[in-house]
Amino acid sequence: MIGWEKQYEILANVLTDKGLDVTAILAQLEKQRIELPSWAVGNSGTR
C-alpha cells in the first residue's frame, strides 16, 4: 500500500486534470468545522 502522501499527490493530479483548483478546495475544507454532541463523547454510550 502506498503512503498517504503519494495517494494525495495522485488525487491532486486527478482533480487538477479535471479542471479543479486543489488549493481552493483545501482552503474551503479548512473553513469547515465539525461539531460533536457532548453526549457522544464518553464511555456511557449513546442511549
Image: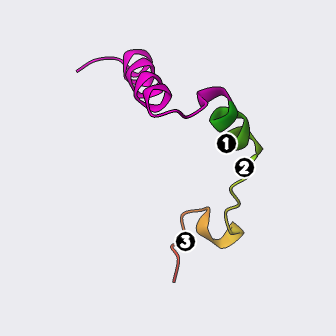
Label for residue 5? Answer: none
| Residue that badge 1 annotates | 29
Residue nearest the viewer, comparing 2 with 39: 2
Q: Are marks 2 and 1 in contact (CB under 8 Å)?
A: yes
* Between marks 2 and 3 in the image, the one whose residue lies nearer the viewer: 2
Q: Are marks 2 and 3 in contact (CB under 8 Å)?
A: no
Q: Position of residue 42 (x, y in %)?
A: 60, 62
- Using the numbered discs, state the Cα–Cα distance from disc 2 to disc 1 in whole angstroms: 5 Å
Query: Could you say which quadrant of the image residue 13 lies in?
Result: top left
Give the amino acid type for the residue marked by disc 1 in the picture.
Leu
Give the amino acid type for the residue marked by disc 2 in the picture.
Gln
40 displayed left or right of 28 = left
| Residue that badge 2 annotates | 32
**Above or below, comparing residue 3 to residue 45 in the picture:** above
Give the amino acid type for the residue marked by disc 3 in the picture.
Ser
> Seen from this angle, which residue lies furthest left?
1
- Using the numbered discs, state the Cα–Cα distance from disc 1 to disc 3 in whole angstroms: 32 Å
Magenta-span inclusion, residue 2: yes
**Label 2 packing within 10 angstroms: few (<14), some (14-19), many (20+):** few
- Using the numbered discs, state the Cα–Cα distance from disc 2 to disc 3 in whole angstroms: 28 Å
